[in-house]
Image (cartoon, coloured by chain):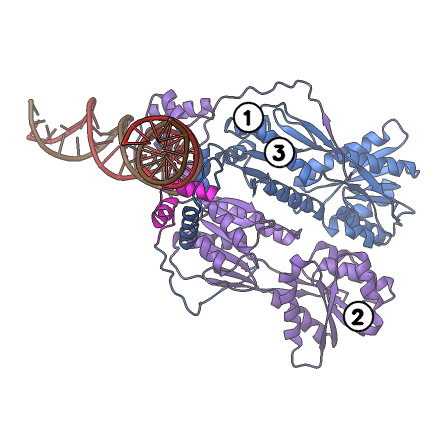
Chain colours: A purple, B blue, C brown, D red
Amino acid sequence: MPYVMVQIPNSAAPATPQPRSVPTSADVARLAGVSRATVSYVLNNTSAVRISEPTRRRVHEAAKELGYVPHAAARSLRAGHSRLVLMPAPSVPIGPLYSRFINELQWALSRLDYTVVQYASVGLRGDEAARAWAELRPAAVLVPVGGIGPEGVAVLKRSGARAVVTLGTERIEGAHSLLVDHAGVGRVAGAHLYARGRRRIGVVVPEEPGLKVFSKPRLDGVRSAVEGTDASVTVLPLAYEEESAARLAARWPELGLDAVFAFNDEYAMLLMRALQDAGVSVPDDTALVGADDLVLGRLLRPSLSTVHIELPAGRDLAELVDRAVRNPGAAPETHHVHEATLVHRDSS
Amino acid sequence: MPYVMVQIPNSAAPATPQPRSVPTSADVARLAGVSRATVSYVLNNTSAVRISEPTRRRVHEAAKELGYVPHAAARSLRAGHSRLVLMPAPSVPIGPLYSRFINELQWALSRLDYTVVQYASVGLRGDEAARAWAELRPAAVLVPVGGIGPEGVAVLKRSGARAVVTLGTERIEGAHSLLVDHAGVGRVAGAHLYARGRRRIGVVVPEEPGLKVFSKPRLDGVRSAVEGTDASVTVLPLAYEEESAARLAARWPELGLDAVFAFNDEYAMLLMRALQDAGVSVPDDTALVGADDLVLGRLLRPSLSTVHIELPAGRDLAELVDRAVRNPGAAPETHHVHEATLVHRDSS
DNA sequence: GCGCTTTACTGAAACGCTTTAAAAGATCAT
DNA sequence: ATGATCTTTTAAAGCGTTTCAGTAAAGCGC
C-alpha cells in the first residue's frame, strides 16, 4: 500500500441537518415582499429600470438574510450565452513561465468579467473533448496545441462558442491562432552554437510523449538554423531519468558531438550531470544550451546558456479573446509570438 | 515592449457566416419526426422506457446530422443538481508530485462520471471565492489549504454543494478534511539531522507569501522533533533568488549552524550552491536536507537528502468525494495522509 | 378634471432539458 | 367484438433566471 489514509473520528459529529433547500430569487422576492422581476433588477443593478431606495434596501437585506446566491446555469440558460472561458489544464507539469502566464491571463479575463475555468480532458480523444467542452456552452475556448482539430473547432462553434483560440505551433482552420514560435527557440540555439564554431550539433528530444508537440518544432528550428552549412544535426532521444542520461553519456565518444541543444533547462541539467560524470567537459568538449531560462540554470556549474522566450502578456491575450467574443463574425486572427533570445552563460 | 504580437492577415478570410443558431433537442425531434421526450429517452439510454430500434436509429441519425450537443446548464437546471466537481487551480507553480496527484484525481473522478473543473480564485478574498463557486452549484468542492473559512463552507453547503473537502493542514468546521501532514515532513527531517549528531539546525522558510501555508507546519515539525533536546532551531527566511541565497550564505559563519532543512529541494539547491560558492562544505560543515524528492536532488553533488512524501492515490480521494456526494448528511470525515520518509543521500 | 409623461413596480413568457402521467396502438384472452 | 395488458410515444410541467410589455399611481400643465 503506497500511502496511509487514517480516518479520525470527529469530536462532535452532528450529522448536519440541512434538508433545507437552496434559496431562489423567488424566496428573496417573497421575503422582501416584491416580485421576482424586482429582485432581478435590484441585484443586477439594471440601469434601464429605476427602483426606489427603500425597496432596493429591502431586497438586499432579504438576499443577505437568506444567503442567496444566483444560479449560474439558470442565468446563462436564460441569457442564451455564458461568460465562461474554458482553458486546458496542463496535464504535464509545466514550468513557472507558463504558470505565470496562466495566472496573468486568468486575472485579465476576470477583470473583463469572464469566468475562467480549467478543464482537464484526461482520456478524451480529440472530438470527445470538444463535445465535452461544448456541453458547457462556453463563450470562448482556449485550446492547447494538438488538443483539437478543425472538426473540434466546428463542434464548438456550432454549439455557440464565439471564439476558439488555439495556442500552439500551427494554425487550425476556423480558429484564432496564437502561434508560439518554438521553432524560433531552436533556431536561436542552433545559430548560437554555429556562431561559436560548433559543427556537430546534438538535439535532445524528450521521450515523454506529451512533450513532442514542443520538441518537434524546436528540433526543426535547429535544423533550419544550420541548413546549407557544413554543420550536422543528430537527434538524441532522452527520458527524464538518470539512467537514460547515463546511457546517452556513455555513447558520447562514438557520437562525436561538440554541442547539444537540450530541449529545456531541466533536460539540460540531467544531461550535464551525466556528461560530467562520464568525464566529458562542458563546454570544452561539448557546448550545452537549454531553454526556458529557469533559475536552475544559473545555479549550475558551469552556468547554463539558455533560450529565453517571452510569452505574451496575459492582458493582450485576454483582449484578443474579448474582441473575438464581441465580434464573432470577424475573420480569425493569427498572431505570432516571438522574441526568443539567447542568454549566453558559461556552458557554451 | 516585452514581447511582440504580430498579426498575420489570413489567406482566405471568409468572415464565417454562422448566424445559424445552435441546435436543440427540439430540432433533433423535429428532424427525426418524434417528440422531445423520445429524443431525451434515446440519447440518455433511459432504461425505464423502451424505445423501438427504428426510432432509436432515426434519433441518433438526426442528432448526428445536426451536430447536436446537449446543454449542460439546462440539464442540471432541470435535474436540480450537477455532477460538477470544483478544484482549485494551483496559483503557485507546483511540482510534478502534486501535478501527478491532480491528474490521477481528475481521471478517477471522471471515471465516476463527474465533470472536474479547475477554478482560479485570483484576486478574490475568502468569501467572494466561495460565492463565485457557489454560483456554479457544484456537487462537490475541493478546497486548498487556506482558501476558505467556515463561513465559506456554509455558503457552499447552503447553495447545494453536497461535499466540501479541504486539503490542507487543518480541519475546517463542516467540511471533510484531508490533512496532509506537512508537520511530519519537518519532523522526519529534524529527527534525521538530530540522529546524525547535528545540534544547531537552520530551517529555510520561503519569503514567497503563497508558500507560507506549507512552510509554517514544516518548520513546526522540525521544532517538535528536537523539542526537549539540546538542539536549537534557527529560522532562515529566503527568497527564491540567487542574491538572497548569497546574502544568507555570507552570514553563515556568524550563524554557526551545522545543519539545514531547506523547505524543499529547489530551495535546497539554491542554498547549496550559495554555500559552496561561499566556501562552506556540504555535508562536512553543514548538513542539508530538502523535501519532495525531485529528480533534481539526485543530480546535485553532493546528492541531496530529501523527505519523500506520499500523496494519497487520486482514486481514494475520488471515492471519498463520491461517498460524500451520495450521502451528504453524514458527519464530516477527517483523514490523515502521512508516510513522510527520509531519503538519505550524500548531503547529510 | 383631463390628457400626458414619469416613476416604480409586476405578470408572464422564454431559455433547453428531463420526467411524470397519460394517451394511443398493438397484442391477447375471453 | 370487448376489455385487459403491454408497448411505444407524447403533452405538459417545471427547474431559476431575465426581460418585454404592461399597469397602477403620482406629478404636471392647462
Chain of the residue where label 2 is placed in the rendered structure: A
* A306, above or below B151, in the image: below
Q: Nearer the viewer, residue B75 or A136?
A: B75
- Of B200 and B320, nearer the camera is B320
User: Where is the N terminus of chain A found, in terms of image quarters?
Assistant: top right
Q: Circle 1 sits on which residue?
A: B154
| Mark 3 secondary-structure assignment | helix
Residue B333 horizontal side relative to residue A58, left or right: right
In the rendered view of the protein, which quadrant contains the C terminus of chain A?
Answer: bottom right
Q: Which residues are magenta?
A: B20-44
Q: The disc labelled 3 sits on which kind of residue?
A: Val
Q: Is residue A215 left or right of residue B47?
A: right
Q: Nearer the viewer, mark 2 or mark 1?
A: 1
Q: Are marks 2 and 1 on the same chain?
A: no
Q: Circle 2 is placed at which residue position?
A: A286
Instruction: Tell us which disc is closer to us: 3 or 1.
Output: 3
| Rendering coords of residue B192 (x, y %) | 87, 38
